[in-house]
Amino acid sequence: MNYNKLLTDFQNINSQSEIEQQVFKDNQIRRLLREAFAKSNYYRELLEQNNIEIKTIQSCADLHQLPVISSEIFSKSMSTVSMAFNDIIRYCHTSGSTGTPKRVPYTRRDIENAVTSQARSYLFAGVEPFDKCLCAMTYGPWPSGMICHAAGEIFGLTIPADSFLGIDHQLQSLQRDKLNYIVCLPSLLPRLERHCQEKDISPASLNVRNIFMVGELFSEDFRSHYEKLFNSKLINMYANTEFGLVASECQYHNLHVWEDFFHVEVIDPDTGEPCEDGVTGELVITALQREAFPLIRYNTHDLVEMHKGPCECGHPGTYLGPIKGRRDNMFTINGGNVYPIALENTITATPGLSSFYHCIIEKVDGHDHLTFKIEARDTVDEQGKEHLTQLFYSNLTGSDVTLRMIFLGLEATSRINIEILQPGEISKKSGKVKKIIDRR
Ligand SMILES: [Zn+2]
């Protein structure tokens, strides 16, 4: 892959009619099923156990005949699932932030496709050859750093490969090398903000044009705070270790799916039936071109709504709304469902609170108890903590109807506890923060 081919391929995809795109995907589905049946013992058994003949699956629309699979596939032996066991050249791990870490293998072609998918997101956002980028993703054991770096090199981007040496080094790189893009977890930005404060540096003076955000949820309040602070545009990307980069955001904050690599469905978590356009359900993805570890109808458990295009930005094809969290992170308390993004929105909309928090749910004497531990943005005394506690509680019960009902009920029985922490108590550790901790 090189820049000119990346550009030409993307222009060709965008100029295809809806019918041409559908024919391409249907061909991919038929080829994938044929290969999986021939080369993967796992999928052959899955089809046979469910009495499915592959000739009955001719298109994306027929795919629902196959059962949805989930993370248990990662407990199977690699040689049983793989369609190209002898061609595996790299193994990576998921972070395990939402469960047991999973080992994910890649063939050379899998890596090339993951890099192309990532590079296309840069292209979509307006990155140009010879821009300069801080890649603050780790370079292992999870795949994101290496993939993001290789994608940048297709453009000829300057990317210092030593950014994981820490926040001080990252800030120095931004200044010294005049980097105009950042690829990072959203939780890097509050750390960078605090470090700039300590060094008396204005974040806007860094002249970062775009910040690509991947791997964690963030709220619209978070977006507007950091866009203003850095005088930059934040661009959300939907990616996970299982699939790599699946979708990238346009100026209307819709996540456009790269449909030559992925077929996406949104299903009702209770019935498994497809959701109507715009209805929230679980995201099920089929990787159309994956070889080392084929994933066909894999339930990510990410909660999202899907729309058939085109979007207002003019890009054709399917797009997703913002990810609302994972179903296994959604929790039921006091009779209501709480989506992680609703908590995230409430916390980041409270002036004085950072986006670093733990929400701990426990069962005490048969009742659900809930504890929030939230970092303040600035150092606070006892009076300041009390003020922030009241402000947060008032936001929690003052906006979202579901949250109001749930948390007023908890307050009535003294089963909610809010603890304000000093800056750094959670964020000093790098990497992802496990925000929802359900100990029931
Ligand atoms: Zn769009």
Image: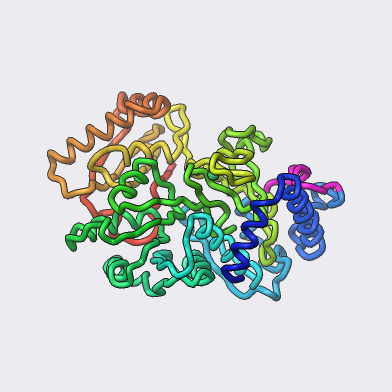
Q: Quadrant of residue 393?
A: top left
From the viewer's perspective, tell me whether residue 289 is left or right of residue 429: right
91 relative to 409, above or below: below
- Magenta includes 61? yes
Q: Along the line of sight, which residue is nearer the eye, 8 or 118?
A: 8
Given residues 50 and 107, the one toward you in this image is: 107
Residue at point 34% right, 59% down?
A: 208
Q: Within the image, what quadrant is residue 368 found in? A: top left
Choose between 136 and 181: the one closer to the eye: 181
Q: Position of residue 56 (x, y in %)?
A: 85, 47
| Residue 328 appears in the picture as rendered | no
Q: Front-most of 251 and 409?
A: 251
Residue located 58% across and 54% down the image: 246
Percent coordinates x, y for residue 301 in the rendering? 56, 45
- Look at the image and tell me whether residue 63 can be seen: yes
Q: Quadrant of the C terminus?
A: top left
Taking 114 as reference, is 440 above or below it?
A: above
* Above or below, 156 relative to 10: below
- Which of the four quarters of the rendered structure image does ligand 1 lie in? top right
Q: Residue at x 39, y 42 (%)?
A: 219
Range covered by the magenta-colored residues: 56-68
Could you say where residue 427 lies in the image, as x and y percent from the top left?
Answer: 30, 56
Residue drawn at x 73%, y 66% is 83
Q: Give the side of residue 332 with respect to residue 409, left or right.
A: right
Give the quadrant of the N terminus: bottom right
Q: State the image coordinates of residue 103 (x, y, percent, origin top left).
A: 57, 65
